[in-house]
Image (cartoon, rainbow, N blue to C red):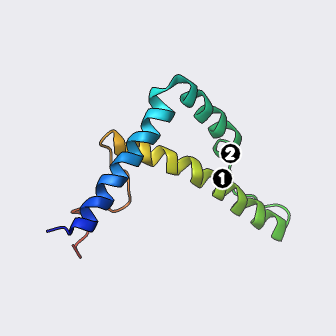
Amino acid sequence: MRTPDELAAIAEQRRVDALFRDIFETDKRGAEIFEILYRRFAAKAKVHTAGGIDAVLKTYQDAAHREVIEFIVAACNRANGVDDSPNPPGENDDD
C-alpha cells in the first residue's frame, strides 16, 4: 500500500507529464518547438572518436543535449500511457 506522500508524488508526476504532452504534442506550436529542439540537439548527437579528450568531452556534451530531448519524450509517453522506462513496475524481481 502506498503512503499519502507516494500517492501525492504520483499525482504530481502525472500532472507534469500531461503538461509536457499538452505543450509538446497537442499544441502545434509546442510540437514545432520540439522538432526544432530535436534537430538542433538530438539528431546530430553522436560518439566522437577523433580528437582525444576533446572528442570525449564533445560526446558527453551531445549526450547531455540528447538526454533533455529524451526526458521530454518520456514524459509525453507516460502521459499517453506508454511506460518506456528500463524497469517498468512489476518487471523487477525485487518488488
Q: Which residue is drawn at 77% across and 60% down?
A: 58
Circle 1 SS class: helix
In the picture, the quarter occupied by the N terminus is: bottom left
Instruction: Name the kind of residue labelled 2 in the image.
Output: Phe
Instruction: Name the kind of residue labelled 1 in the image.
Output: His
Looking at this view, name the residue that lies furthest to the left: 1
Q: Name the residue under label 1.
A: 65
In-image side of 24 versus 56 (left or right) = left
Looking at this view, name the residue that lies furthest to the top: 28
First in sequence: mark 2 vs mark 1: 2
Q: Name the residue under label 2.
A: 41
Q: Position of residue 76 (x, y in %)?
A: 42, 41
Q: Residue at x 21, y 63 (%)?
A: 90
Q: Residue at x 65, y 41 (%)?
A: 43
Q: Position of residue 36 (x, y in %)?
A: 66, 33
Count residues near mark 1 (Cα–Cα under 10 Å), then give few for <14, some for 14-19, many for 20+.
some
Circle 2 SS class: helix
Q: Residue 50, which numbered label? A: none
Examine the rendering and report whether any part of residue 28 can be seen. yes
| Marks 2 and 1 in Cβ contact (< 8 Å) | yes
Camera-nearest residue between 91 and 76: 76
Q: Which residue is drawn at 21% across and 72% down?
A: 95
Q: In this view, does 54 lie above or below 28?
A: below
Q: Where is residue 5 in the image (x, y as percent from the top left)?
A: 27, 67
Determine the CA span between mark 2 and mark 1: 5 Å
